[in-house]
Amino acid sequence: MTRSINTANTAEECDTSCSGSTMDLAAAKAELIDDQAAVQFADWFKAFSDPTRVKIISALLKRELCVHDLTVLLEMGQSAVSHQLRYLRNLRIVKRRKVGKTVYYSLDDAHIEQIFLQTLQHTNHA
């Protein structure tokens, strides 16, 4: 048995008779995020698209950890963890502090923690 799907109620486009809203589109366009900021914003959220990076951020929420600690927590090789940390550091999501030969990582600032926790709360919202 085949079922037909009514796309008229689910289409994400205007009806052919739509002439647009009464909104001042020039003003709305002036308020849009600029191209460079949009790219940076998207790149920043790409960092949260990888489960390993999400786990690293989660581990660093409450404490500073060295690379070795993270490899044990994540059960991953040092090379893989270091690669992800470098990616996060380039986006200023984490920062590092070197003591002798040991490198400690922490979240770059409180904004990272707030965004992460808000996103986690939204994800867990039923």
Image (tube, rainbow, N blue to C red):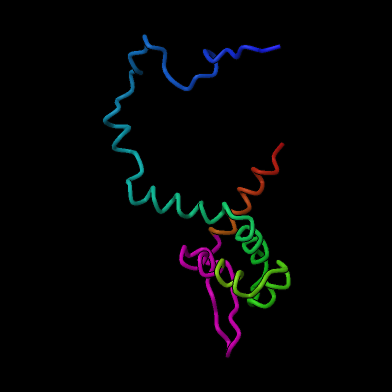
State which region is magenta. Answer: 85-110
Residue in the picture at 65% in, 49% down: 120
The residue lying furthest to the top in this view is 17
Point out residue 122 in the picture as x, y percentages from the top left corner: 64, 43
Residue in the picture at 58% in, 88% down: 101
The residue lying furthest to the bottom in this view is 100
For this rendering, which residue is in front, 1 or 35? 1
For this rendering, which residue is in front, 44 or 81? 81
Point out residue 85 in the picture as x, y percentages from the top left corner: 56, 69
**In the image, 28: left or right of 77?**
left
Residue in the picture at 58% in, 87% down: 99
Q: Compared with residue 31, is residue 8 higher up or lower down, i.e. above or below?
A: above
Residue in the picture at 37% in, 51% down: 37
Residue 103 is one of the magenta-drawn residues: yes
For this rendering, which residue is in front, 11 or 97? 11
Find residue 50 and report its image quarter. Answer: bottom right
**In the image, 32: left or right of 4?**
left
Find residue 55 and report its image quarter. Answer: bottom right
Point out residue 125 in the picture as x, y percentages from the top left corner: 69, 40
Q: Compared with residue 37, is residue 97 higher up or lower down, i.e. above or below?
A: below
**In the image, 66: left or right of 75?**
left
